[in-house]
Image (cartoon, rainbow, N blue to C red):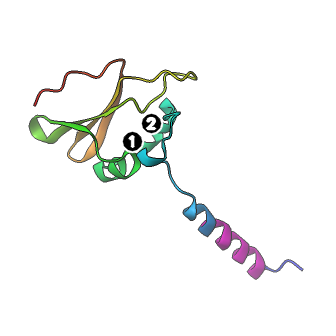
Amino acid sequence: MNTPHRRHTSLLLTSLLFLLVPQPSLAQVGPDGLSESEVLKLTVGKTAEDVRSALGEPPHVVKGKNGIEHWFYPSIVRMGKGTKRFGATEVVLSSGQVNHLMNHANMPPIKP
């Protein structure tokens, strides 16, 4: 017999298992890197802390005016379905929120 209590228990257990599934992070990117859609899901509309926890500490940070920061991650995003990667992914943050994202064919020169 399938009682309401059993159905709620099953739903609760399924929800808890979903929470235990690891989210991609820089440590879990692996040799294949991330697809463009995966990196968009991990960054667009997120906070700086969300991006940091998903992609790791950015290797290059350029601080601009008015609280704008440019975070550069080298070679983490695949171009299309192939194995070739963009030279860098730039995450632009304004007041701690992702403003936009750009993939560069080559790593832009970073000024100190």
Q: Rate crowding at label 1 as few (under 14), some (14 to 19) or many (20 or more) other CA atoms within 10 Å.
A: many
Residue 33 counted in the magenta span: no
Q: Is residue 61 visible?
A: yes
Q: Rate crowding at label 2 as few (under 14), some (14 to 19) or many (20 or more) other CA atoms within 10 Å.
A: some
Residue 67 vertical position relative to residue 90 in the rendered view, above or below: below
What residue does disc 2 label? Answer: 40
Amino acid type, residue under disc 1 in the picture: Thr
The residue positioned 50% from the left and 40% from the top of the image is 30
* Displayed quadrant of residue 98: top left
Residue furthest right in the image: 1
Q: Is residue 25 visible?
A: no
Q: Quadrant of the C terminus?
A: top left
Residue 10 counted in the magenta span: yes
Residue 38 versus residue 11: which sits nearer the camera? 38
Q: Which residues are magenta?
A: 4-15
* Displayed quadrant of residue 105: top left
Amino acid type, residue under disc 2 in the picture: Leu
Q: Secondary structure at mark 2?
A: helix
Q: Position of residue 14 (x, y in %)?
A: 67, 66
Mark seen at residue 43: 1
The residue positioned 18% from the left and 26% from the top of the image is 110
Q: Position of residue 16 (x, y in %)?
A: 60, 69
Q: Is there a contact, CB below 8 Å, between mark 1 and mark 2?
A: yes
Q: Position of residue 34 (x, y in %)?
A: 49, 35
59 to the left or right of 63: right
Residue 58 versus residue 40: which sits nearer the camera? 58
- Cα separation, mark 1 vs mark 2, equals 5 Å
* Displayed quadrant of residue 74: top left
The residue positioned 17% from the left and 38% from the top of the image is 68
Residue 87 vertical position relative to residue 16 in the rendered view, above or below: above
Q: Position of residue 46 (x, y in %)?
A: 36, 47
Residue 7 vertical position relative to residue 27 in the rendered view, above or below: below
